[in-house]
Image (cartoon, rainbow, N blue to C red):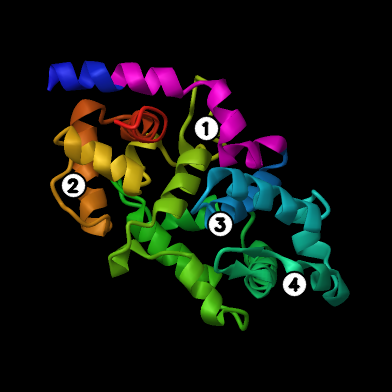
Amino acid sequence: MDELKEFLDEKAALYNQPKFITSDPIQIPRAYSIKQDIEISGFLTATIAWGNRTSIIKNAHKMMQLMENSPYDFVMHHQKQDLQPLSSFVHRTFNGNDLICFVQNLKKFYLRFSSMEDVFLANATSESLQPSIHAFKQVFFNTDYAGRSQKHVSDPLKGSAAKRINMFLRWMVRQDRRGVDLGIWNRLNAAQLSCPLDVHSGNVARKLGLLTRKQNDAKAVYELDCSLRKLDASDPVKYDFALFGLGVFEKF
């Protein structure tokens, strides 16, 4: 275990660097300074974060442009006619109708809460934010504007690995001294985070003996969480950089 920890610590340090930002979707929320702008841009970017990363970044930039590069102001003050240009947006199965739905729901959300952190905090446990994801989805879609768009926010309590929203939470919560994750939420901590599990990180984790479950689902996330907490209980998701880097950049 000591040898594995040393190896993964080394890889985490290698990839948890500002140069990582230039090829990662985290560059989108990093362009903003207002808390709600960071939350909205991060949430929408994470929502479309599947497939080719170049395409994800390109389309996330397009979303921000459609929102006049001021997402919070656009969400809170848009008129009906302002939503029309959004209808042309498409990223894989997330289309213009979904984007409009999310914008409308975000307005209703921010009329109730000053920050997304409020909902995640209220439903967190000392060791996990997975119940918080479930609660956030219920709150976010508790409007007239939901329908098919609900499928774009995964629910770990229904068995999903919820990779994209776990990645969003890593961005928002993790206090990163190396300058990648934003860490703008200070009422939650990195010990509560779960690793964003996808094909790459899952395959690497299995090769390293950190994960035995074959499916990338909520049970696999829990198993990986337990393994990574043995390596670093206070910051287990720093190893996301190691697993991702080994899988994507080193073809481990």
Inter-mark Cα distance, 4 to 2: 40 Å
Left or right of residue 196: residue 149: right
Which of the marked residues, 1 or 2, is nearer the chain's N terminus? 1
Can you tell which mark lies on residue 105? none
Can you tell which mark lies on residue 48? 3
Residue 242 percent location from the top left of the image: 35, 28
* Label 1 SS: loop
Residue denoted by label 2: 223
Which of the marked residues, 3 or 2, is nearer the chain's N terminus? 3
**The one of 236 and 220 positioned closer to us in this rendering:** 220
Q: Amino acid at mark 2?
A: Glu
Badge 1 local density, few (<14 within 10 Å), some, or many (20+)? Answer: many
Badge 2 local density, few (<14 within 10 Å), some, or many (20+)? Answer: some
Give the residue displayed 65% in from the left and 65% down from the top.
90
Inter-mark Cα distance, 3 to 2: 26 Å
Residue denoted by label 4: 87
* Label 2 SS: helix
Tag 4 and tag 2, C-beta contact below 8 Å? no
Can you tell which mark lies on residue 181? 1
Badge 4 local density, few (<14 within 10 Å), some, or many (20+)? Answer: some
